[in-house]
Amino acid sequence: MHSLIKVGGREIRVTGRVLRMARLEADKYQFLDDPQTLLEELRKSPTRVDLFTFMQRLPETTPKYGYPMEMDNLAAIPVTTFEHWWMQQIGFKARNKAKQAEKRGVVVREVPFDDALVKGIWEVYNECPVRQGRRFTHYGKDVETVFREEATFLDSSIFIGAFLGDSLIGFVKLVHDETKTQAGLMNIVSMIGQRDKAPTNALVAQAVRSSAERGIRYLVYSNFAYGNKGRDSVSDFKERNAFQRFDLPRYYVPLTAFGAAALRMGLHKKFTDRVPEPVLAKLRKFRNTWHNRKLESVAETS
């Protein structure tokens, strides 16, 4: 069960049927400088919220507040200049990949949010129903849905497109926080069929350049580690492109007695956080095999 409410001028996402847990709709992209004011507004809200969670922004790695907390993490590049990242922070493999895109005719640039971009994003999303061994959640969406979903946070968004001729083959939606201290890759998706041209590497390079030009000090690519999950191709890609792990406080503030009890019992944690990594690895392998077989079956009948 999901609902979106507006409290204190902020959009809040509330999830859960029994334990009603809330966070900023732009959690990890926008942050709270005065959490107490929002917490007081949430307590007055007609929508029941048992537990509210929020994270500190970079580079504030030391806890600032007295609320219950656990350490979370982000994958981020400390940004000074594009030239420093290009020559000092990444290795030859990542540089060669980005150069490969240019050599093969890929042009990367910032683009306005308009109907042409949305149509290109829709085509990228609907290329394949399975990505990285799992069902791709954006596959099958119509153009109107893609427009509505990509039109969020436009005042703080930068769109970057990777083009082969006139065709969009990959894009980034970069969302910066209120202070322009950090910017997060809310979306970074490229066409699987164009992987040999390394558009994703070129998109990361332009995201670094766009951040440096605006004085944004950190470029964030979601988490560096996810619970008990081990390394995979995405974490390797992040490391090659100079993303580092930053551990940051994540607070869990009970707003009801039930929320306090749930927090003590650890009910705020995801189920996967409780499962040993060897078991998760076997489940992921089974899931990947199932999705790949399903994809092969669809291809054979088409």
Image (tube, grey):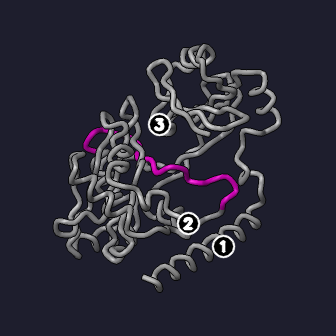
Q: Which residue is mark 1?
A: 285
Q: Which residue is mark 2?
A: 134
Identify the disc placed on residue 4.
none
The residue closer to the viewer here, 71 or 123, is: 123
User: What type of secondary structure mainly makes up the magenta span?
Assistant: loop
Residue 55 at x, y = what percent?
57, 34
Mark 1 residue element: helix
The Cα atoms of the two marked residues, 2 and 3, are separated by 24 Å
Quadrant position of the C terminus in the picture = bottom left
What range is drawn magenta here? 212-229
Magenta stretch contains residue 35: no
Residue located at (62% from left, 37% from top): 15
Residue type (three-letter) at the residue carrying disc 2? Arg
Residue type (three-letter) at the residue carrying disc 1? Lys
Mark 2 residue element: strand
Report whether 165 appears left or right of 191.
left
